[in-house]
Amino acid sequence: MTEQRPTLPRYLAEWSGRQPQFGPAISTLLTAVASAATLISDRLERGALSDVLGSAGLQNVQGEVQKNLDVISNDLMVQELLRCGQSAALASEEVDELIPVPEGVRRGEYLIAFDPLDGSSNIDVNLTVGTIFSILHSPRPGAAAQTADFLQPGTAQVAAGFALYGPSTLLVLTTGEGVDAFTLDRDTGHFVLTHPQLRIPSEADEFAINTSNERFWEPPVHQYVGECLAGATGPRGRDVNMRWVASLVADAFRILTRGGVYLYPLDSRRPIRAGRLRLTYECNPIAFVIEQAGGMATTGRQRILDVEVTGLHQRIPFIFGSASEVERIERMHREHDRDDPAFDASLFNTRSLFRAG
């Protein structure tokens, strides 16, 4: 029965009691995130009935075509986060510069970075999408925020998480005390704790990677994927299934509940860009959640939460999941980088892993 489970407000009240240094501000911010997630979920649920599907005819700062719901979701996040009065400034994946607190609106002490609608390419085919958020303490409380204020490592995050808009609407949250997930109860309008203290299995038999990029992968990634595909007859000694949703939040929640590993590795297409996913809006908050659930998150060569942040829209490689799998992938990168004899790339020349040589 949902009434026997704590709602998000009760959960946050208890957390605030254990963390008096943050006062009620973080609770207020997280309540605002939950409110925005509820509104976004409503728009998504109505879909074509509200004429909100399709392209907005615009491009975001990344040069990506925006969906109508990208714009709507961004506006709803901004609306709720500014209304709550605890924001020092906002940074959105959909906007080039930071979003300051307007004149006449109360300025708080926390910075919030967010991806308003992750996986939006899935909207028109009715697949799972989500919202990712990260909360940082402003290094200059009371002053008008600057872009440099957001350039903090992932270790500085106070709270982070994501909303998942699927068969049910979930809010996954960490405040540094593990990971809890809440399900939106449509009858009451409250998020209710349904998945307390999620822990990622240390080993699993699933991996997620976009194989259309195979020709651009580095040798360590070829080696890892090749071992997985070899199944029970290969070095792993067991069959491994491949999953790919093209929605970071959906893949992340599957790993939180079933284990496995997600790879969006460095590839040779974009030598100027170090990777595909955004450090501030996607990698740092997801990595915080994954580590708090007992997993690991890496670029392949460095812990995600230790990566130096050099820009609001900085991109990096992103690999995360069950600790044993991520450790295995990191070891392959180390062996390759130092030309260790233990690394065997002889099977991974130019022929594909997915067709006969």
Image: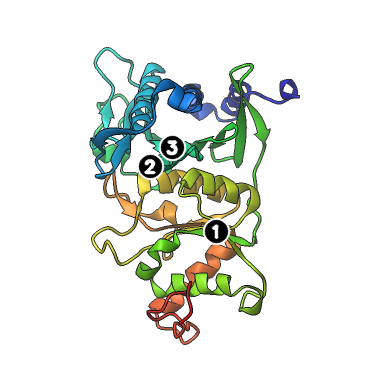
Q: Residue 62 at x, y = what percent?
A: 26, 45
Residue at 53% x, 48% y: name it. Answer: 252
Side of 345 relative to 17 (left or right): left
Of all residues shown, which one is farthest toward the top?
A: 104
Q: Amino acid at mark 1?
A: Val
- Drawn side of residue 273 relative to residue 1, left or right: left
Q: Is residue 158 left or right of residue 241?
A: left
336 up-or-down from 58: above or below: below
- Helix, strand, or loop for circle 3? helix
Amino acid carrying label 3: it is Ile
Q: Which quadrant holds the C terminus?
A: bottom left
Label 3 and label 2: CA atoms lie apart by 19 Å
Residue 346, image x and y in percent? 44, 85
Q: Residues within 10 Å of mark 1 (few under 14, many from 20)?
A: many
Q: Position of residue 179 (x, y in %)?
A: 59, 41
Kindly identify which numbered label has been placed on residue 123: 3
Residue beneath disc 2: 281
- Quadrant where the N terminus is found in the figure: top right
- Marked residue nearer the N-terminal end (1 or 3): 3
Q: Secondary structure at mark 2?
A: helix
Viewer-nearest residue: 300 or 38 = 38
Considering the numbered disc 1 on the image, is that residue within a helix, a strand or a loop? strand
Residue in the picture at 45% in, 49% down = 246
Instruction: Inspect the image, locate mark 2, and give the three-letter code of the amino acid beneath it.
Output: Tyr
Residue 132 visible in the displayed image:
no
